[in-house]
Amino acid sequence: MAMKKVTGAIPSIIVLAVVVIIWWAAVVLTKSVIFPTPGKVVMGTLELASDGTLWEHIAASLFRVGAGFLIAVLFAIPLGLWMGWVHGAYVTLNPLFQILRPISPIAWIPIAILWFGVGNASPIYLIFIASVFPMIVQTTTGVHTIEKRYLRAAENFGVTRKKLFLQVVFPAALPQIIVGMRIGLGVAWLVVVAAEMIALRSGLGYLIMDSRNAGNRYELVVAGMIIIGLIGLMLDGAMRLLENMKNVRWRYVH
Amino acid sequence: MFIKTKIVVEEVRKGFPTDDGRLDVIADLNFKVGDGEFVAIVGPSGCGKTTLMNIIAGFLAPDTGAVKIDGVPRTAPNRNGVLITQQGSVFPWLTVRENLLFGLPDEISNREALAQEYAELVGLKGFENNYPHELSGGMLKRAEIARALVVKPEILYMDEPFSALDALMSLRMQNELLRILAKERHTVMLITHDVEEAIHLADRILVLSPRPARIQATFDVPFAHPRRVSNPEAQALRVAILKELGVELV
């Protein structure tokens, strides 16, 4: 099993190696003085790690994403369940969310500054806005797609509303809710860089902009980008662990 | 033979609106089922068997007429009569044990013991903490039967319960059902397209006409259990029922 995993990863490793070689060759051949080689990026990353600033930036970004995402979860899941279960709530609120949903979170930046000023609240708000809609939509869909046979079985056993909700509606919708959370967290992380462009003095987004502005340190710009990518991958991996919970596996197997 | 009447289906009619007008599915059905009786309903496909079952179980209201259980009109489903369908409705997000506990009211003190007892009764001992997707088709059906029985319903409504299983498993489950019914008596209404299954299980077989459904014929099945569907009397009964269904055996 472990051997299979290792051999399965070989093609991806080769592709990554090829990309790094092409990158290195392109910089060397074009004799670019600004764009860094992979080696310089590694050195830059080590420099940031050793003086501790890298961890501060990562912690700041994770805090903002964590806070914005958590508020979105607490808001979207109850709302989505309600909209999924109560038809009147759905027809009333769905048009509003369908209008708000396509608006890029970046378009909210001026309003975020206006409402929340320059500080942690603005990026947290932008992350909330970015992740809340996919979760509302997926949760609502999760409830709408509960198979009738399960609702009928519950009706047959004459269970209380509380039991119906806790043991049928919520767990039946849970796999879809997790899909929404995965999408939501992905979008939240995607937005963190833009959110941190609002003049703050920490975060990976700030690191990237600051490295560019303070003396064209492009090796730190690229280092920041790669770290964002790697953390995004890890966050998605963590959300995937939720999909392995035994009480939601039924939706993903077959 | 039966002490009292359990189910009365009285002048039940049902139709559905369609683009071309109205589709009459059930036309004027009348019959009774005795307490503890096992009645099978067979009929051509699309004749309204499932609609009839949904009406009797309380999931669907008839246009006219009534279904009475112990003399009381049935207007909504309840745990006194549990429906088991071909598709099955064991909750995939709950373990076998949790599924069995689901229908039991919280105030019952021995819920866990009951769940355990019925898991064992259907042969699922050792699988109580498994999730449905970890079970085979046959085991899943056993879990569904256990979940129905654990609430001690007076009536079991079975709508093609075993038709999604392969022939061998279907036969095993029929035997399993008979074994359970020998232990605890329930009134059973079975809908099936399988005449042999009906002869194997039922005390009485109602043959429905093509849509709109009426009762076309009634057959008593006077054979003691365990039955051999291959014996000549059973085969003669099978031929007679198939003839009613428009199938001539040569």
Image (cartoon, rainbow, N blue to C red):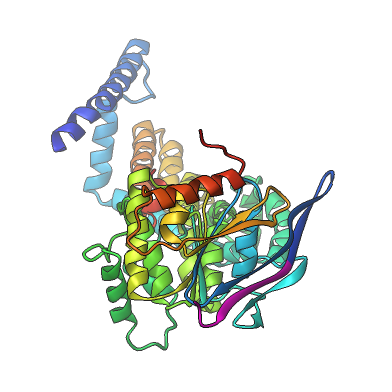
Left or right, B69 with respect to A26, comes to right
Which stretch did the figure color magenta?
B1-11
Above or below A26: residue A3: below
Residue A28: quarter of image: top left
Residue B122 is inside the magenta segment: no
**In this rendering, does residue B71 appear at all?**
yes
Q: Nearer the viewer, residue B20 or B250?
A: B250
Residue B5 is inside the magenta segment: yes
Q: Nearer the viewer, residue B1 or B131?
A: B1
Percent of width and height locating residue A205: 45, 46
Residue lying farthest to the right in this orientation: B21
Percent of width and height locating residue A141: 58, 53
**In this rendering, does residue A243 appear at all?**
no
Percent of width and height locating residue B100: 37, 71
Residue lying farthest to the top in this orientation: A29
Q: Main secondary structure of the magenta part?
A: strand
Left or right, A198 with respect to B167, comes to right
Above or below A227: residue B104: below
Q: Nearer the viewer, residue B241 or B17?
A: B241
Residue B70: quarter of image: bottom right
The residue at 55%/64% (across/down) is A151
The residue at 48%/77% (across/down) is B154
Percent of width and height locating residue A214: 42, 39
The residue at 25%/62% (across/down) is B127
Above or below A8: residue B200: below
